[in-house]
Image (spheres, helix red, strand yellow):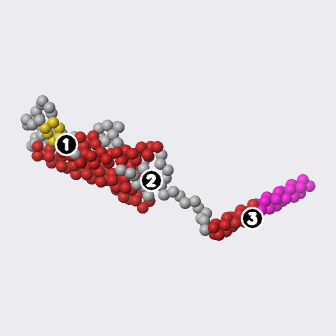
Amino acid sequence: ANNNVNLSYNKQAQSSETTLYAQDRRHFVTSSLSIIGSCALTGTTLLTPLPSHAATSPQQQKDKDNIVKGYNRLQYLLDNWVDKTTVCKIGQETTFGDKCERTPVVVMEYLGFKSTSDPLFKADTAMLRLKDLVPSDREVDFYDAVDAFAQNAEEASSMAFVSSWGEANPGGGKDRVALFIERAKNNVIASRDALKTIIDILDLKV
């Protein structure tokens, strides 16, 4: 008898659950159709459009500012190239008797290799932190620009370092230093252009 009572109770419970599920499902379908119909009449869409760019975090804003500052500094360096790559020693002559000599060592400073507070210190890392803000159709251009900057900045820094020993090295001389300076300048130009590409992609104000 108890088994019959339990069986009857279970059937009633299952029937109630089935009825509630059917009611909930009908309510869901009816509500969904109502929403779809309303959207069709008003011409609206069911999905909220995603913003074209993600929200900018404080760190990303700092990275943006540093990229622009770094770009402007490189432009200033190029506009005053001879002056900035010439060092004059007052009251002291250089190795070959001149008071002034050309050296691109300052390039390392402008490219962020001298100080952690420089705008371009670890600039490629800062650029990659902004990857979420890049439009999908410019992703390839963005990563190419990051690679171009990193490569040319490193080469410019290397040329600057080598040139600082140009006259002291065997076979060295002013002509060798001048060669290193010219190579460093070409790398700085390429670095600046890569930054400008990134600035354009991120729609930053210079």
- Residue 98 position within the rendered picture, expressed as x and y whole percent measured from the top left: 9, 37
SS assignment at label 3 = helix
Residue 101's image quarter?
A: top left
Residue position marked by numbered label 3 in the rendering: 26
- Residue 84 position within the rendered picture, expressed as x and y whole percent measured from the top left: 21, 42
Q: Amino acid at mark 3?
A: Arg
Q: Nearer the viewer, mark 2 or mark 1?
A: 1
The segment highlighted magenta reads 1-23
The one nearer the camera, 190 or 173, is 190
Residue position marked by numbered label 1 in the rendering: 83
How packed mark 2 is, by other alpha carbons closer than 10 Å (few <14, some 14-19, many 20 or more), is some
Separation of residues labelled 2 and 1 (CA atoms): 38 Å
Q: Amino acid at mark 1?
A: Asp
SS assignment at label 2 = helix
What residue appears at the point 18 percent right and 45 percent down from the top-left corner? 82
In the rendered view of the protein, which quadrant contains the N terminus?
Answer: bottom right
